[in-house]
Image: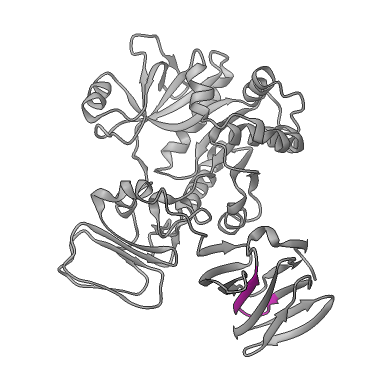
Amino acid sequence: MHLILLSGGSGKRLWPLSNDVRSKQFLKVLPGKEGADCNRESMVQRVHRQIVEVGEKFHWDSITVAGSALQKDILGVQLGKDINIVIEPERRDTFPAIALACSYLYSEKKVSQDEVIAVLPVDPFVENEYFECIAKMEELIKSGNTNLVLMGATPFFPSEKYGYIVPDMAAKGEVLKDGSISLPVKMFKEKPKAGEARVLINNGALWNCGVFGLKLGYILSILQDKYGVTDLSFSSMLETFRGLKKTSFDYEVVEKAKGIKLIKYDGPWKDLGTWETLTEEMADKTGGNVIIDDSCENTHVINDYELPVAVMGVKNAVIVASSDGILVANKGDTPKVKELLKEHHMRPMYEEKRWGTYTVLNHTELNDGHESLTKKLLIRAGCQISYQYHEHRKEIWSIISGEGELYINGERSHVAVGDVIRIKEGDKHAIRAITDLQVIEVQIGHPLVEEDISRLDYDWK
């Protein structure tokens, strides 16, 4: 059984700590396996760890993560080099993402069309039993009685935030090897009002976990029959990707499928998609340089700055300060953050890269039509920035801590604290950290965009 994890979403609901690059699933705020303060993990790290733990029993064949190009580096940093990562050329919702990942498994990993695939989000907060339940999908699919299996979680209250799956309670269920019963799906209901949700629950409805079990060939046949795709190779699908309908897998496949089966997960299941739900599971009530007094009740404060944030007498609130902005909100109102910011657009001010991190310190429009962008780079010891050049900007690097090896136009030199390096347009340049290296980078030119990076070698020696 092969697993596809969907990680392409942005992070507006957990602004300002999350952005298009550091989406909610990458925030290291959850307690690690041992619950120690020094062992924090992100949602995607937690899910990956649980899959590996359960995989010792069920022996997953492979794990593939589908994400956006902006997430490539941070996925590699948080999950390691052994994970399969499929990068979507652009965000086009879950159906194109799943189709691309399936093409990758088929053509690059040579997975048979008869193999069972489970697709799931990277960010549910669940126990290991959730993944054991996913493993049951393989048994149902291989029975030949259905092409598609969904998973539903037992509702704990009539939530308006989740979709619901209503099983056909009158139908004869399929008994699995462990004695559990799978029922046919009768209908779906997306985010009903509380009163209607209560009625649905009384009729046996389950929360829709967004998990799909199917054979690889099922998706490939849809691409062939409905979209006329004749070349299922991954390279061809990368070209075809933008021509696929921008739609969800639920709408394009699930709502049109016949004979869908449902398995039930009885354990805890939570979508940590808002500050209100995330703070319920965070390791601490504060993070960073925070001073909070005893008069505060049910209040969480996270500070990414070196300057202190002091909080007094605040109740039921979330306060978050980062390079992307400052949020002060009542916990009950935090689900509205995304709507509040829908017209707010700015570049990500913090990003994790495969070599370290950067924080944007300043962005200024100059009088001559150029721009100035100042970043603080942290390059981890033993890591390096790729050998590259720019056509539309020059850069000034100031070393403020650590030492490294500089590589410019084929010449190498040693750099340390106090050194200043000037890089002109077209200069081929790279730097490797011998010890942890902090660099203030000033970019001057126009436009100052990531597309103005021509990489020559990632692993120059």
Q: Position of residue 435 (x, y in %)?
A: 63, 80
Is 336 in front, or is 232? 336
Is residue 208 placed above or below 424 in the rendered structure?
above
Q: Is residue 132 visible?
A: yes
Is residue 306 placed above or below 58 in the rendered structure?
below
Res. 196 image quadrant:
top left
Q: Position of residue 245 (x, y in %)?
A: 59, 29
State which quarter of the image contains the C terminus: bottom right
Q: Position of residue 455 (x, y in %)?
A: 75, 62
Is 427 in front, or is 404? 427
The residue at the point 47 percent across, 20 percent down is 255
State which quarter of the image contains the N terminus: top right
Q: Position of residue 140 (x, y in %)?
A: 52, 20
Say left or right for 39 vs 79.
Answer: left
Res. 167 image quadrant:
top left
Which stretch did the figure color magenta? 432-445
The residue at the point 24 percent across, 34 percent down is 157
Res. 103 image quadrant:
top right
Count of residue discs: 0
The residue at the point 66 percent across, 20 percent down is 221
Is 348 in front, or is 267? 348
Is 224 in front, or is 264? 224
Q: Is residue 2 visible?
A: no
